[in-house]
Image: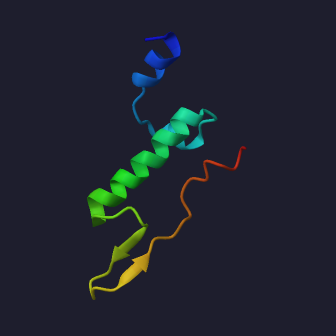
């Protein structure tokens, strides 16, 4: 395995990934968000079910990882 592949393979999610300039770290942040959504609601579509059973879209006010591109 080459050096770059090894560096990527050793990466883990870190909250600072949301503000990183690294494409790999930004990808980790997006994947982490999707896994969190799936774990919480069973889906990655950004919708949560309220107590009445109605789907409510999640607000998209979190980290804007694309703002520095």
Q: Residue furthest bottom?
A: 52
Q: Is residue 11 above or below residue 26?
A: above
Q: If the image is split into quadrants, where does the C terminus sit?
A: top right
Where residue 21 appears, as percent x and y from the top left, is 64, 35
Image quadrant where residue 26 sits = top right
Asked if residue 50 is positioned above or below residue 63 in the image, the reply reads below
The answer to whether residue 27 is left or right of residue 43 is right
Residue at the image point whose x is 56% and y is 64% from the top: 61
Q: How does the figure colour the protein chain or chains?
A: rainbow
Where 31 falls versus 43 (above or below)?
above
Residue visible at 28% across and 62% down?
40
Q: How many circles with numbers are drawn on the protein?
A: 0
Q: Position of residue 53 (x, y in %)?
A: 27, 85
Query: x and y percent of residue 30 in the render?
Result: 48, 48
Where does the image place residue 29, in percent across and percent down from the top left?
48, 44
Task: Check the image and name the residue furthest to the right.
Answer: 69
Residue at the limit of the structure toward the front, as seen here: 1
Residue at figure coordinates x 36%, y 59% from the top left: 37
> For the N terminus, which image quadrant?
top left
Instruction: Report whether 31 appears left or right of 40.
Output: right
């Amino acid at each position: 395995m080459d050096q770059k592949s090894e560096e990527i393979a050793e990466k883990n999610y870190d909250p600072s990934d949301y503000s990183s300039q690294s494409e790999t770290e930004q990808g980790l942040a997006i994947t982490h968000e999707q896994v969190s959504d799936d774990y919480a609601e069973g889906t990655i579509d950004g919708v949560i079910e309220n107590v009445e059973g109605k789907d409510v879209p999640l607000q998209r006010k979190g980290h804007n990882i694309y703002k520095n591109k």
